[in-house]
Image (tube, rainbow, N blue to C red):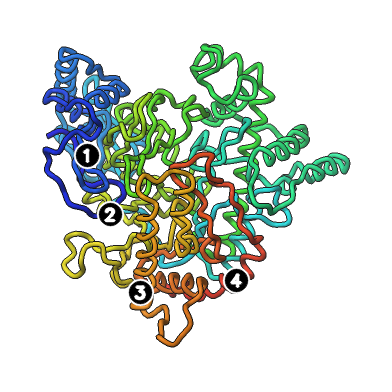
Amino acid sequence: MAVGDDQAEDGAPSLVVSRSSPIGNGGTRVNEELAALADEHGVATWYEDWRHQRIEVDQDVVIAVLGQLGIDASTPVAVRAALADAAQRRTRMPATIVLRQGESAPLTGPAVIELEEGGSHAVVDRLPTDLPLGYHRLRTGDDLTTVVVAPRSAPRVPTSWGWMVQLYALHSAKSWGIGDYGDLRELLRRSATELGVDVVLLNPLHAVALTDPVQSSPYSPSSRRFANPLYLRIEDLPEYQIVDEATRARIDALAIPAGGDRIDYDEVWRAKHAALELLWPAARPVDLAEDPALRDFATYGALAERHGGDWREWPAALRDPHSAAVTQARRDLADRVAFHAWLQACCAAQLDVAHRSGRDAGMRVGVIADLAVGATPNGADAWALQDVLATEVSVGAPPDDFNQQGQNWGLPPWRPDRLAAQGYAPYRDMLRAVLRQADGIRIDHVLGLWRLWWVPPGETADRGTYVHYDVEALLAILVLEASRAGAVVIGEDLGTVPDGVTEALQERDILSCSVLWFQRAEDDDPELPAGTLLPSGRWGESAAASVSTHDLPTATGFLRGEHVRIRAELGVLTQDVEVERRRAAAERAEFLAHLVTEGVLTADSGAAEPTEQEIILAMHALLARTPSRLLLAAPYDLIGEERQPNLPGTVDQYPNWRLPLRLTVDELLADPRVAAAAALLRREDTE
């Protein structure tokens, strides 16, 4: 059978239709030989949508996606030749073998295993079960195979509670128009000492392209391997302390007042960039000789200043990061390359201070960094890593109940074949880079380790298909890197997911995600009708639980039906607005009744209607009753913010990622609503 998918990413239960249902993309059905070739390369020829209806993928889409994997399927002759090549490849040793600690694997013949820490020895029929953890090399004739040996599980997350915070939204008297690493330091230190917080989950701190206009979405970075200089606190830099008073005065005059209704990323960067340029002459250059990744990233920054932020529009000779022209440009632009390397050293230093402040204050976990699904096609990672990325493809999601036109995230995916051929080195290097500045990692859209929705060039979001990855390899490396860093792991597995995903996470002690809106009985639940809200006692134990997420309505927005109003106003609904309003009102009533049933909200017949704040506090009281190991609260929810941070399916129509908190860090931590929620969410560790 061709590669298919058991479930859709998101959506409500519905009737499963016949597997002979018509083609959903309106094109030609895939024939048997093309389906077999697609199966060889992990390309789905059908999938089940959010209604559990089988959708056949248009033949043209399958051919286009195979082409992005370097497979010619344009004619029947080409398909047969590609099938023959695939059969020949199966007779050789794979490029990567993945073992969990204590496991073995058969060999095709005598080989030599070269251990990561040094030393080698001959093996004959099987790999031994006592290989140490790490990345080893296996030589079998002319074949070289990477052998990954991983622990069986990631470090265990203690029972705890904490914040999930959009760093850009924080502000204080010292902020320059956006939250910064100094605000993070204070939030960590004071939350631990005053509220008993053990963890702070942050939006991705990945580097964005620092060209005009500056990208506001933390989930569309230029690089996932480096940090965002927009978050630097200028006055905390050592160079600020050593420059003369006149220079400091010029820098102080650049400061942007905190607060306001919108974050202006361009204005923030213009001010901070001017200040950093004034400090640069006092800086100590960074040695790039031992860090090729930083050298390439800083080179991209220097070239982007001269030629623009999109490397695909640079002179042809500069589009290849390994070309002689790039080597010469690096010499010619040495000062600017050094400048961008220095910015990363500044980010690393300020992040380290923030992390230490949380640990010194007694946090048992610390900072959990969010890992975006990908990086932009025109940015630093796409330029430096183009040999392992499908740079012309965009990942996204097929149509579902909330995003009814599908989603195109504008991010190129890893090529699974190239990752395996390189022993997953780019993937593990990226994980190390993120964990170098964090105590844990959250994998956004963790289903991407299993499969990603690829949209070929020129197609709309609904005309794509899933491409499958070697999830055993990706999970093993994730667990190995987390264990080496002593870091905890969360996998964002929201919505209806394929069978086995959540179980695979839990088996490796990776927390899944439980969100109040989605905790409902499945179709095969023996105790409750399908779709019924789950009692708090039946929430998952191996989970990070929250009321909402950055992509969903805030608690206040949900209660007011804001998520329907704004989507209707912006034209991203494809269903009737009145139907959506009635459904939202019914869901609100359902949740209120559920809170009463749980005993966290009072509903006496003679009592006044509960206030929004009482309902929101009851939502967090319900979280506290669950067995979920980690409880997360969002400032937006606790202080009654109506607007959600991001509205999927929009770009400029909605102020995505530009909404600051209405309170400063000081005001947030002193707010009685926060104190009341903290009193509920604090729990003693019973492990």
Q: Position of residue 318 (x, y in %)?
A: 54, 15
| Label whose residue precedes the other's in the sequence (2 or 1) | 2
Q: Position of residue 316 (x, y in %)?
A: 51, 12
Q: Are marks 2 and 4 in contact (CB under 8 Å)?
A: no
Neighbor class of circle 1 (other Cα within 10 Å; few <14, some 14-19, many 20+) is: many
Which element carries disc 4, helix, strand or loop? helix
Quarter that holds the C terminus: bottom left
| Residue at the disc numbered 3 | 593
Residue at figure coordinates x 64%, y 24% from the top left = 305
Quarter that holds the N terminus: top left
Residue at figure coordinates x 45%, y 60% from the top left = 561
| Label whose residue precedes the other's in the sequence (3 or 4) | 4
- What is the C-alpha distance between the residues marked 3 and 2? 20 Å
| Label whose residue precedes the other's in the sequence (1 or 4) | 1
- Amino acid type of the residue tagged 2 in the rendering: Ala
Q: Are marks 3 and 2 in contact (CB under 8 Å)?
A: no
| Residue at the disc numbered 2 | 12
- What is the C-alpha distance between the residues marked 2 and 4? 40 Å
| Label whose residue precedes the other's in the sequence (3 or 2) | 2
Give residue 194's mark: 4
| Residue at the disc numbered 1 | 47
Between marks 1 and 3 in the image, the one whose residue lies nearer the viewer? 3
Neighbor class of circle 4 (other Cα within 10 Å; few <14, some 14-19, many 20+) is: few
